[in-house]
Image (cartoon, rainbow, N blue to C red):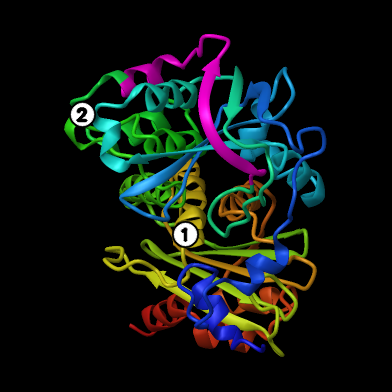
């Protein structure tokens, strides 16, 4: 069957826009059968990084997956995107797929007054380091791994009979405060965690298991939703700070090439504007059957946006990285971020890939220019898509050109 590639770009395995009951891309990329050393086992003992995933199917009754590799020791890097970004993709996948998951179901509102097993999972999730854990599974491990555009990949699963924590989790003081304070709103807790140095990846895990927020409003949040929610909340607050800084006084272009991806960042003298664009080449993840690159762009003005971007969670992951960069500079700017994805990058690995690579992009070197046209001429020599195609889809470029005519 040949699927319209534009449907794949819009859907990304989420909405079945092609009319099939399954996503052929995800099925094609799914790795069946397990992790070396645990096939057929019903007890898995190891050091959880910690790691917990919350699914979305069946909402408001959802599956919760505490996970551990079948090894003991310092496994914290298995939940550290700052480490992943410097790994080869195959090494990252191999490592993440060692996380064996136990599957158990709860209603989302159970987080308000968690039953014993959910309480144990929350205690695991808030730990500041690896926790010796034992997954007692109702069936031997014999299931596919998870590959998603939103969440990092994880290994196979089996129904969970019970979870046993062999060591006492040690949460950071600020995490303990957020967990214990049942009068603090979830958004405020997320911001407090971020300001205290807790990475958004950890904050999203806490939000997902219902470990933060006002007591009567605490609930389980599917992991893919919590990731985007945290990126949106934190970047939104950073942007409000950025709007108080003076405008940048030059055009800057940042370039990063990694794993069959090209990231371009343009900062222009202007009040806050933001754009995220992606061009998927034939043979890449979400353009498996296309004959030419498919481009999608979303943007916002000074006052932000009140609709969810069609381009998905990568929009907010990249926006967070851009806002962090401007906050470090104590400047505001119009931000244009473009990503080209080439053949060879054909596995969904999660939005962390965008967030961490845009963070690295803005920590790298850049070229300075005195005009927008000079900056675009330089970009034209870096991208594979003709610059006129990027420019024709760019909303922020149009705003910048209008501003020069006023």
- Choose between 41 and 55: the one closer to the eye: 41
Q: Is residue 349 above or below residue 15?
A: above
- Visible in this render: residue 238? no
Find the distance from the CA under tag 2 to the CA under tag 1.
Answer: 27 Å
State yes or no: residue 157 in magenta: yes
SS under mark 1: loop
Q: Nearer the viewer, mark 2 or mark 1?
A: 2
Q: Which residue is mark 2?
A: 215
Q: Locate residue 114: give its quadrant.
A: top left
Magenta-drawn segment: 154-179
Residue nearer the viewer, 370 or 343: 343
User: Looking at the image, which residue is at 39% across and 69% down?
Assistant: 309
Q: At which x and y percent is residue 289?
A: 70, 84
The residue lying at 33 percent from left, 18 percent from top is: 177
Q: Residue at x 42, y 72 (%)?
A: 310
> Where's residue 245, x and y in %?
36, 48
Would residue 152 be found to the left or right of residue 172 on screen? right
Give the residue pinned by disc 1.
313
Please state the horizontal and vertical placement of residue 66, each as a whole percent of the image: 53, 32
Tell whether 250 sits left or right of 108.
right
């Amino acid at each position: 069957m040949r699927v319209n590639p534009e449907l794949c770009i819009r859907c990304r395995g989420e909405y079945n826009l092609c009319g099939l009951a399954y996503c052929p891309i995800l099925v094609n990329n799914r790795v069946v059968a397990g992790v070396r050393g645990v096939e057929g086992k019903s007890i898995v003992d190891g050091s959880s990084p910690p790691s917990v995933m919350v699914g979305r199917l069946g909402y408001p009754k959802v599956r919760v997956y505490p996970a551990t590799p079948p090894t003991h020791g310092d496994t914290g890097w298995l939940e550290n995107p700052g480490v992943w970004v410097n790994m080869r993709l195959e090494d990252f996948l191999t490592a993440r797929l060692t996380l064996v998951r136990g599957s158990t179901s709860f209603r989302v509102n159970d987080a308000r007054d968690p039953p014993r097993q959910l309480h144990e999972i929350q205690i695991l999730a808030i730990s500041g380091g690896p926790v010796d854990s034992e997954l007692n599974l109702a069936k031997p491990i014999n299931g596919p791994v998870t590959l998603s555009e939103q969440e990092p990949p994880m290994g196979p699963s089996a129904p969970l009979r019970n979870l046993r924590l062999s060591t006492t989790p040690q949460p950071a003081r600020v995490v303990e405060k957020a967990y214990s304070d049942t009068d603090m709103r979830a958004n405020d807790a997320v911001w407090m965690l971020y300001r205290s140095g807790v990475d958004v990846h950890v904050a999203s895990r806490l939000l997902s298991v219902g470990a933060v927020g006002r007591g009567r409003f605490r609930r389980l949040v599917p992991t893919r939703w919590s990731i985007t929610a945290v990126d949106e909340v934190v970047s939104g607050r950073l942007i409000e700070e950025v709007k108080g800084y003076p405008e940048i006084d030059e055009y800057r272009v940042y370039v990063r090439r990694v794993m069959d991806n090209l990231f371009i960042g343009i900062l222009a003298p202007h009040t806050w504007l933001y754009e995220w664009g992606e061009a998927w080449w034939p043979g890449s993840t979400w353009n498996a059957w296309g004959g030419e690159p498919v481009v999608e762009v979303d943007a916002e003005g000074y006052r932000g946006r009140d609709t969810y971007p069609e381009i998905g969670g990568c929009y907010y992951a990249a926006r967070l990285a851009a806002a962090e960069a401007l906050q470090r500079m104590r400047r505001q700017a119009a931000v244009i971020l473009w990503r080209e994805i080439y053949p060879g990058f054909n596995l969904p690995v999660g939005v962390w890939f965008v967030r961490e690579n845009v963070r690295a992009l803005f920590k790298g070197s850049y070229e300075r220019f005195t005009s927008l046209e000079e900056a675009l001429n330089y970009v034209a020599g870096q991208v594979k898509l003709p610059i006129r195609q990027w420019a024709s889809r760019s909303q922020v470029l149009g705003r910048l050109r209008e501003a020069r005519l006023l």
